[in-house]
Image: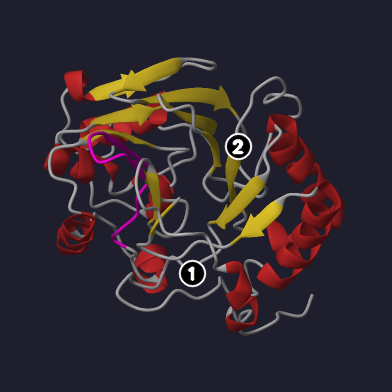
Amino acid sequence: MRIRFGRPGIDRYAGLFDVPVATGGVGVTFLGVSGLLFDDGTDAVMIDGYFSRLSLARIGLGRIAPDRRRIEAGLARLALGDRLRAVAAVHSHFDHVLDAPTVALRTGAVLVGGESTAHVGRGGGLTEDRIRVAGDGETIGYGSFALTFVASAHCPPDRYPGSITAPVRPPVRAAAYRCGEAWSILVGHRDGRTALVQGSAGFVPGALDGRRAETVYLGVGGLGVLPETYIRDYWTHTVTAVGARRVVLTHWDDFFRPLDRPLRALPYAGDDLDVTLRVLTEVAGRDGVALHLPTLWRRSS
């Protein structure tokens, strides 16, 4: 099979970066990869949040650890104060959970996710009272927000499969961050707003049936190199299942590039955003669903 070099350009999709700026109430800030901050000015919850953005060479050849300088810079930009209540992880790969214990320690938040994520927290210095292991179908309240965890699956192929069975104490190889439990996370707010965070482009058929969310933050990393039938099934078992009328795409950006540089798409070697957007634009138009790309650091409605 011939390797395709380069990456899709995102300038051609400029019209999709049109999620309105939040002017009050709940705002959602895109942090790169599948990172999202839900914030109403009093309470906040973070899903993932990968600020370290380590280089491909570091990931592939060395041992990795959170980059505290980059984490501090990201948190300073968000100006969270003491209102971050929880940091949740959709699964336990490094680009989702590496920074989570440091963020929790820095802000006073609780780390919540599966047992594998809990082991990352233990290795990162969190005590048991700062770790919450979620169960399938469980709803946990954090201030004005409620997080519901629904068992899901990682997008194929899973490069680091399996569970984490002991505390992970960095620096370690990237492979130490095995996937563990994968989740669909439903985020509800006391004002009635609802969202689904599908951080990995995997799904369990029927798992979200009967759930409802107005907006889906749909992870698409790796989706563009999978069969079109898979892409359509993914849409059906996430967006269609919850009756969403709006979709914001996440996990399309090159997470080996630091956040102080403009975002760019993942290379063709691992993904094809052009294919993903062609198929999803078609199904979104068919279903009358608005499709968007998020803007980094923008607090959006």
Q: Is residue 58 visible?
A: yes
> Is residue 165 in sight in this rendering?
no
Q: Which residue is at a point 35% across and 62% down the rendered structure image? A: 297
The earlier-in-sequence mark between 1 and 2 is: 2
Q: Are marks 1 and 2 in contact (CB under 8 Å)?
A: no
Residue at disc 2, secondary structure: loop
* Residue 157: percent from left, percent from top: 65, 50
Q: Amino acid at mark 1?
A: Asp
Q: In the figure, 65 relative to 268: above or below?
A: above
Instruction: Find residue 119 and report its horizontal and vertical position in percent.
Output: 31, 30
Left or right, 27 with reference to 12: left
Going by the numbered disc 2, the residue's amino acid type is Glu
Residue 61, quarter of the rendered image: bottom left
Say if the magenta span includes residue 103.
Answer: no
Callout 1 crowding tier (Cα within 10 Å): few <14, some 14–19, many ≥20: some
Relative to 301, say whether 163 is above or below: above
Q: Residue at x 44, y 65 (%)?
A: 255
The region drawn magenta spans 38-52
Identify which residue is drawn at 15% across, 40% down. Answer: 107
- Numbered badge on residue 12: none
Query: Which mark is drawn over residue 214?
Result: 2
Instruction: Tell me the element at label 1.
Output: loop
Residue beneath disc 1: 254
Given residues 143 and 193, the one toward you in this image is 193
Q: Nearer the viewer, mark 1 or mark 2?
A: 2
**Residue at point 39%, 73% (across, down):** 257
Residue with the most extreme front position: 23
Image quadrant containing the N terminus: bottom right
Q: Is residue 15 left or right of residue 19?
A: right
Pointer 2 local density, CA inside 10 Å: few below 14, some 14–19, many at least 20: some
Q: Position of residue 41 (x, y in %)?
A: 25, 41
Count the numbered circles shown: 2
